[in-house]
Structures are given as structure tokens and as C-alpha cells.
Image (cartoon, helix red, strand yellow):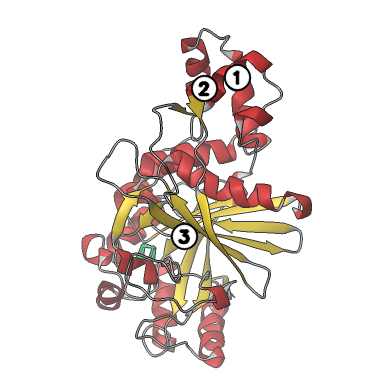
Amino acid sequence: MELFPKRKRLMELLGKSKEELRELCVALGEPAYRGGQIYHALYAERKLEVARMTNLPAALRERLSNEARITLPHVKQRFASADGSVRYLLALPPAEDNAATKETSVEAVFMPSEGRQTICISTQAGCAVDCQFCLTAQLGLIRNLTAGEILTQALLPLEEHKAELAPQTNIVLMGQGEPLLNFEPVMAAVRIMLDGEGMGISPKHVTLSTSGIVPGIERLAKERVRPKLAISLNASHDEQRDALMPINKKYPLAVLMKACKDYPLRTWEHLTFEYVMLGGVNDSAEDARRVVKLLAPMKSVKVNLIPWNPGELPYQESSPERIEEFRRILVDRGVPAFVRYSRGRDVMAACGQLALLDSSTETGLVSIIQ
Ligand code: SF4
């Protein structure tokens, strides 16, 4: 069955800013403020069908139903973890501006916990960055996602779980893809997340994680509205990082660390460094001491140590003792460090595991879930 039958060319509402929706209403001969009402209904109230936007006059709803659309992904599968997390495998329709693209899939993970829920979303389908410890890298880059496709990954799980939502929502842009290589759509989505009249999430609760795309970090630094920034570090020296993250050959540690040092932090903010612990590869006491040295020039940092999530890659987990020793070395030298166990490991929803794994994937990766 075709999930997305050929679509009539209609105006897409999802992903549009308030200004764009106001302009769209004016073009339809409606007052501009109707655009603000659509914006509020879409993002603040998550009314993902025009028919549910009862803040609009019936005649306008009727017109929008004929002339506009809200494209939602098709939920191919939900994988429920024993820890309460849900991994969503979402099918997206082909990109409208590129007839050559096919239907594609991405993943989002909903993780409820005491007092909050965290949603991990993808910014690209697949990824070109080729980190050696990451299953997503094996997909290669399939395509960039639009702002609407990025937002729906948060809106959809929130709407599905609305009966049991905790007061605080965290969004982490840490799923498939390198967010800073899809800058404009990512920032268009983030502005809507952080807008009080949009999704209304505090910038303290939205985190963008990068593999270290230095021009993107410099560009993000100039944005008036921006999320928190996390750097996926994973190595303590260039040779090691070149091997684990080939992007390091383009932006070596000295260049990356300078961009981090120059990054303008807000008073409440710190830079987060993510460090995936790979047994016998990057988890020695010397590695820990080198990480301390690397981060020494920076004012406000924290390190998240992420135990490796086993996948189909040739790495091993670090032992809990090794991880604790690494953490102790950082903390004793004044670098706040925390061990972050990933959620959803049993359903391939954890860090570095998002690779569209299901029984019908077109990527050649085989099913290990059920
Ligand atoms: Fe891409 Fe992130 Fe995976 Fe690296 S870790 S390959 S940047 S998805």
C-alpha cells in the first residue's frame, strides 16, 4: 500500500513561522492575525488537523482544508522499552521540491521520567559525518529534513502522551543527523520550539548536539534565539579523534576547542561535552587527564560520560570501574562529570543506535528487535 499517495500541491502549514503564516493568510485575503491563530493552534495546542482549529471561523477552516495541508509522518512502528521509552519509526513523504527522493524514514525517541519527558529527534535522515561508533553513520546521508519534519517528531509524541505529560519537556537534537549541516531548517524549528507563543519550551531545555562543525558553531553563536549546545567529543587527542570521527581531520581539536572557548554562553549556561566510553579505545586514565587539559581554557563546562551502547559495531563497553575512574579524574581536577546511561537500549533507541532498525528497512540493516 502506498503510504503517501500522490498529493495535490497544497500549501504546507507545518514548519511555517508566525510571520509566514500571517503572510499566507494575507495572500488568501484573510486578516494577518489569523496567521497568529493558526500558529498558536499548531504549535501551542498541537492541533495537527485544520478541522480541530476551532479558534478559526468555520469558513476559513473549510478553505484551509481545501487549499492547505498539515503533513504528518506515518508512524510505521512504535518500539516500547521496558524503561518506558518509546522509539518511533516514522515514514516521511518524498521531499516535495525533489521528485527524485523517495519516501524515507527517521526516528524519534520519547523518554518519560520523574517530572519531565525528553524527546530525542532527528535533523537529517541518515548522516554523512561517519562517526565510527554510530550506527546511523552506516545509512549515509539520505536527505535533510524540513523544519516541519523536525517539529513533528516532537509534536506527535507529545500529543500521543498528552494524558500523562509531566510539566517539563526537554528536546534534544541528538537523533539521526548532524544538526549544524542542516542549519536553516533546524533553526527555523528551534525558533518555534523556543517561542512562548509556539511550543513555549525554555532554551534551558532544548539541546543541540554537534560532532564539531566549527563554521556551524560560529554561526549558532550569532543567533539571537538559540538552544543549548553540546559537543560530541569522544576522544582526547587528534589521532584518536581522527580515527573515531573523521570530521576531526577537517576541524581538528585545536580549532574546535577555540570555537568552544569563544562561544558566548548565557549567564545560566554551560557547554556540554559528550564522551562515549569505548572500552580500551578512549577510556584510559591518560585520556581523562588529556580531556581535563583540553577543557581547561573554557569557563563553564560539564562532561557527560556515555557508556557505549552495544550495536553491530566492533567496540566494547568500558567497565563500570573504568568509567568511574575516568569520572573521578575529571571531577578531582574541577571538571563536572556525570555518567549518563542511555534510555531505550533494549529497543535500539539509545545514543548511536538509531539506524532505522526494523524488519522492513531498505537500508540493508537487519532486524534485531521484536
Ligand atoms: Fe552523524 Fe551524530 Fe552519528 Fe556522528 S554520531 S555519524 S554526527 S548521527
Closest to the observer, 20 or 243: 20
Q: Amino acid at mark 2?
A: Asn
| Residue at x 27% of width, y 39% of height | 98
Q: Amino acid at mark 3?
A: Gly
> Dot 2 surroundings within 10 Å: few (below 14), some, or many (20 or more)?
few
Helix, strand or loop at label 2? It is: helix
- Measured from the top left, where is residue 240 in percent x and y? 29, 78
Give the mark nearer the N terminus: 3 vs 1: 1
Q: Which residue is mark 1?
A: 62
Q: What mark, if any, has residue 66 been given in the picture?
A: 2
- Measured from the top left, where is residue 142 in percent x and y? 31, 55
| 216 to the left or right of 17 | left
> Dot 3 surroundings within 10 Å: few (below 14), some, or many (20 or more)?
many
Q: Quadrant of residue 211?
A: bottom left
Closest to the observer, 312 or 247: 312
Q: Amino acid at mark 1?
A: Glu
Q: Which residue is mark 3?
A: 175
| Residue at x 56% of width, y 9% of height | 30
Q: Quadrant of the C terminus?
A: bottom right
Residue 322 versus residue 88 in the image, above or below:
below
